[in-house]
Image (spheres, rainbow, N blue to C red):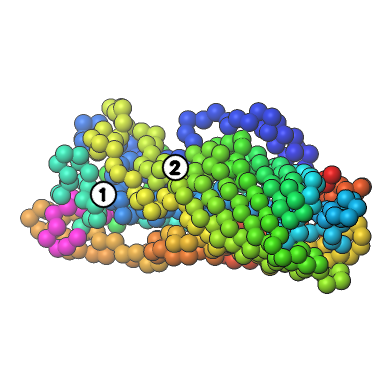
Amino acid sequence: MPRARVASFVSALLMLSASARAQSLSEILPRLLSESVTMPSTTGTVAGNPHEAHFLPAVAQLKAPYALNSALVTQLSTFPLGSSSGGFTYKTNEGTGIPERNSNNFGPAFAERALTNGKGRFSVGANFQHVEFEEFEGLGLSGDVRFYLQHNDCCPGQNPATGAPPPTTTGPSGPDDKNLFFEGDLVRADLTLKARTDTVSFFGNYGITNRLDLGIAVPIVRVDLNASMSSNIIRLATSAKPTIHSFQGASPDQRVVSESGSSSGIGDVVLRAKWNVMAAPGGGIALGGDLRLPTGNEKELRGTGATQAKASFYYSGEFGKLAPHVNVGYTFSSGSVDPSVGSYALGDERATPTVVSSAYDTIFPEPPPSALTEADLQVPDEINYTVGLVVAVHPKFTLNADFVGRTLRDVNRFLVAPQSFNFRAEAPPTAPAPLQSATYSDGLVLAGRGDLQLLLGVVGVKINVTRTLLLNASVLFPLSSDGLRPKVTPVIGLDYAF
């Protein structure tokens, strides 16, 4: 773990405050999207300038980029933190009152075993993990995520009260459609995103009886986002009049904008209970319950904004030096991410020669509705499952390996699919130009709703440094390409029992 990173995180941990900025982390991608299509006015007296809202079109088309933001927020905030159970477990001898160790290994890193601490026994510790994300739905976050944005229907069919475009129509819809020709242009927006989290999780467990443990896990989280959007005007309709849509400058057809921010503070606190219902060598069978509280700031991506309750079944056993374990659980979620993940966000107006107070004032007298529904914002239920093996290599050295799976229920799913757009070139009003169509096959679109499988592999070691102090080191690596995919993730921690 680099010293500079540790020093930076400790400083943030002591301050427990987010860096100063104008918007929260959940608003970065919506704002970036609007900034990326902001164009200077060509004529200060023409209504609808600057051109920002012209390329923030119908709600249905904007749902894909905003749904991506909602998915990022949920998956970033619920990344696994690891087990909070102690590596030393005991059973108090009822005859002598003396606690005795009931396992020859130190347990798994990202799973629970059926063993409990033992009556009157405490275990405390802390883990540090650094997570960086590199893909979303199999697409690299270094520019492979791409959206096509149409010009909105700026004239025919507008709502006379609000000025909003028709909900499902952009661009010419048929040979008799009198929409202005320049509405056939597109903006292609390519997203680059660097997202990372540094988390220190403090945990404690106490044995109420030989069979019942109560515990708590308190994460302190730092989130860093650095995003940019490269926008390119696709001149399907205005190649003969490029000044109608232009970013101006040396590259009038292209603009790159960036947004970044960071946040530090407490995450979602987890309360835990485990009851061993059938004792056997290495554990037997236990039932568990977790209550995840919405203590983290969801606008700053340190929490989900939801209360989550997880019911779990644990099996673990010991067969010589080998100790297999299986966890199966279901997480019930109640709550939603902040609505700002799916709202229009005003970019930097570039009005010339007349500066307007807001681009929305000239397009939408009232703020447009969110692109996301209540269902899109809900934090999903989960099916949780883990299978793993612990090997007692030496009395002071244990190896562990886990297969960690999560199934997020009924969430937005995405795919790269062909999209067709209608346009026509400029022509005299008495003789509309023929309707044409252009198809692009590399844009990210919504594919409906369904379950999302997130799979991780874990390998690690636990070393008995002295007495009942353990040094834990693990590496997480992705086993699936769906959803938000992390890079190889290091985890290091300490565990002490008394």
Q: Please state the horizontal and vertical placement of residue 425, each as a whole percent of the image.
A: 22, 57
Q: Which residue is mark 1?
A: 152
The amino acid on which the numbered mark 1 sits, given as a three-letter code, is Asn
Residue at point 59%, 62% (across, down): 329
Q: Is residue 223 left or right of residue 243?
A: right
Q: Indicate left or right for 34 with 435 as reference.
A: right
Q: Quadrant of residue 479?
A: bottom right
User: How many numbered dots are placed on residues in this image?
Assistant: 2
Which residues make up the magenta segment? 173-190
The answer to whether residue 436 is above or below residue 199 is below
Query: Which percent across, then down, holds residue 390?
Result: 79, 65
Q: Which mark is residue 223?
A: none
Position of residue 198 measured from the top left corner of the image (x, y, whole percent): 66, 43
In whole angstroms, how far apart are the C-alphas of marks 2 and 1?
26 Å
Q: Is residue 56 left or right of residue 288?
A: left
Q: Position of residue 165 (x, y in %)?
A: 22, 47
- Tell me what residue is drawn at x 53 percent, y 38 percent: 297
Tell me the element at label 1: loop
Viewer-closest of 31 and 381:
381
Residue in the foreground of this view, choosing between 316 and 97: 97
Pick the front one: 235 or 408? 408
On the rendered image, what quadrant is the C terminus found in? top right
**Does residue 20 appear left or right of residue 218 in this picture?**
left
Magenta-drawn stretch contains 177:
yes
Which quadrant of the figure has residue 416? bottom left
Q: Residue at x 40, y 53 (%)?
A: 376
Mark 2, residues whose alpha carbon is within 10 Å: few (<14), some, or many (≥20)? Answer: many
Which mark's residue is nearer the viewer, 2 or 1? 2
- From where the camera sits, is residue 369 visible? yes
Provide the residue designation for mark 2. 338
Query: From where the camera sits, is residue 245 visible?
Result: no
